[in-house]
DNA sequence: CATTTGCATTTGTGATCACAATTGACCATG
DNA sequence: CATGGTCAATTGTGATCACAAATGCAAATG
């Protein structure tokens, strides 16, 4: 193990946590998929010790559920839970977007437009994982301007819980249209239009999900 | 170890997690307090294995911070962070209270009044831990009626992050008055007054904290 | 007195082990 | 064919170990 205090050093359990977190958040795994300590340990060539720690951290955040017998799997969300998490997103992301607006300069809008183009490509290719990833990148890029790290962390926990089920929903719907609300968000950012931004963000995170939950 | 599938069975790491979580959430520890694996292991008479897992879970939720060298301690929140967490509470708890309102029958109001009396006793005794605990019990009892488990879990994560700093703030202010907003919340519940309830909950979770952060 | 050095102690980490409980596969029975 | 029993394999758990890095303390130095 290299020097701990160096910037580039990450403990094995932390690296595992981050890798698995991204995998789950971006829908690289389906709902209901089991994950065993020894399976993950073998995949990453480590002992089960850091794996246990990483999986338990993810379970604490709702990214993994633990069966009564103690086994780990990705959660399959009920429609009630989807609605609840969408409502949470609407509450928090609207606030994040509002806080970001004063710092939403043209460079940000251009960056978001670039991401939106990538989203359209992913949609055209019916690539659920890239779609989820780029969609969240769109949102995260905007909300980082809010400079509200605890709120952003909270929303990321919501995204994380939704990853596998989002994958299943996108796969089922075979969506062909790029998200129109992103364009409304971009227009509101350009215009410095706070009420319009709030409406667009809320619509983006709730209406889309309501359709998907049918 | 007893039978795993029995209701009463909890793994050591889970018991530890729960005990330490409550300790932190209710302000039984001050901000900046260190926590070592072997210290906790000795206190609870277990090996370091479940302790590591429990402490890492708590760190994932922001209940503990990890220094660059890897050590665990309770976080001391900046004023910015306090404001941000209060804003999160305002967003989510107002929604929880609103969702709870249709199920807020007289038995609930009476239960909340009983808790409020206990809060007043804790305030009169300048007992910060009991105050924090009973205050959160007031809110949790109300929000359980919302039947929105993911939202409630999210808010509890916020409470958890605030526990040690709330302890320090209450200790510094030596508050003598019971929280008046709780009475407004109770009145709004009795009257079925949604706008009044929203205002009272928002005021309770934000104004009090703003005063405390001075 | 402030700073540096040396060293013992402490701390967190990953690996390994043994164990209890659960699961899955296979076979027997009705 | 459905159900129950048996047994090996799998799974998660806590304990222990060795190790590297960080910390704290005392002594030496400027």
Image (cartoon, coloured by chain):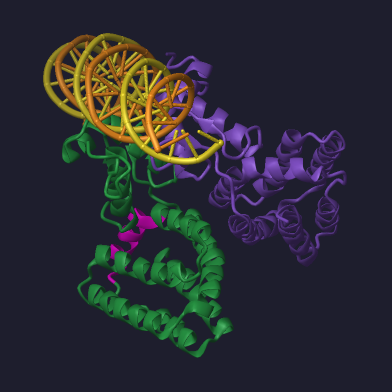
Chain colours: A purple, B green, C orange, D yellow
Total number of numbered labels? 0
* Residue A91 visible, this orientation: yes
Would residue D17 be found to the left or right of residue A90 on screen? Answer: left
Would residue B6 be found to the left or right of residue C24 on screen? Answer: left
Q: Is residue B117 above or below residue A126?
A: below
Q: Quadrant of residue B13?
A: top left
Q: Quadrant of residue A46?
A: top left
For the point 37% across and 72% down, the residue is B138
Q: Position of residue A187 (x, y in %)?
A: 86, 55
Q: Is residue B41 magenta?
A: no
Q: Position of residue A29 (x, y in %)?
A: 62, 33
Q: Is residue B57 above or below residue A208?
A: above
For the point 71% across and 37% down, the residue is A133
Q: Is residue B53 above or below residue A76?
A: above
For the point 66% across and 57% down, the residue is A99
Q: Position of residue A158 (x, y in %)?
A: 58, 49
Q: Position of residue A177 (x, y in %)?
A: 87, 46
Q: Is residue B173 magenta?
A: yes
Q: Quadrant of residue A176?
A: top right
């Amino acid at each position: 193990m290299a020097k701990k205090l160096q910037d580039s050093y990450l403990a094995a359990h932390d690296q595992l946590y981050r890798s698995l977190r991204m995998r789950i958040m971006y829908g690289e795994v389906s709902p209901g998929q089991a994950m065993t300590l020894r399976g993950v340990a073998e995949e990453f060539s480590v002992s089960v010790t850091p794996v246990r720690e990483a999986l338990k951290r993810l379970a604490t955040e709702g990214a993994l559920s633990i069966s009564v017998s103690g086994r780990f799997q990705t959660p399959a969300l009920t429609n009630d839970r989807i609605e609840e998490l969408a409502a949470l997103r609407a509450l928090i992301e609207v606030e994040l977007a509002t806080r970001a607006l004063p710092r939403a300069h043209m460079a940000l809008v251009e960056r978001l437009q670039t991401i939106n183009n990538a989203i359209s490509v992913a949609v055209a290719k019916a690539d659920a994982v890239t779609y989820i990833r780029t969609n969240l990148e769109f949102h995260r890029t905007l909300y980082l301007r809010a400079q509200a790290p605890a709120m952003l962390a909270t929303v990321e926990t919501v995204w994380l819980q939704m990853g596998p089920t989002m994958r299943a929903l996108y796969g089922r719907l075979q969506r062909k249209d790029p998200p129109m609300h992103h364009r409304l968000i971009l227009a509101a950012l350009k215009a410095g239009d706070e009420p319009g931004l709030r409406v667009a963000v809320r619509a983006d995170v709730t209406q889309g999900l309501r359709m998907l939950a049918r």
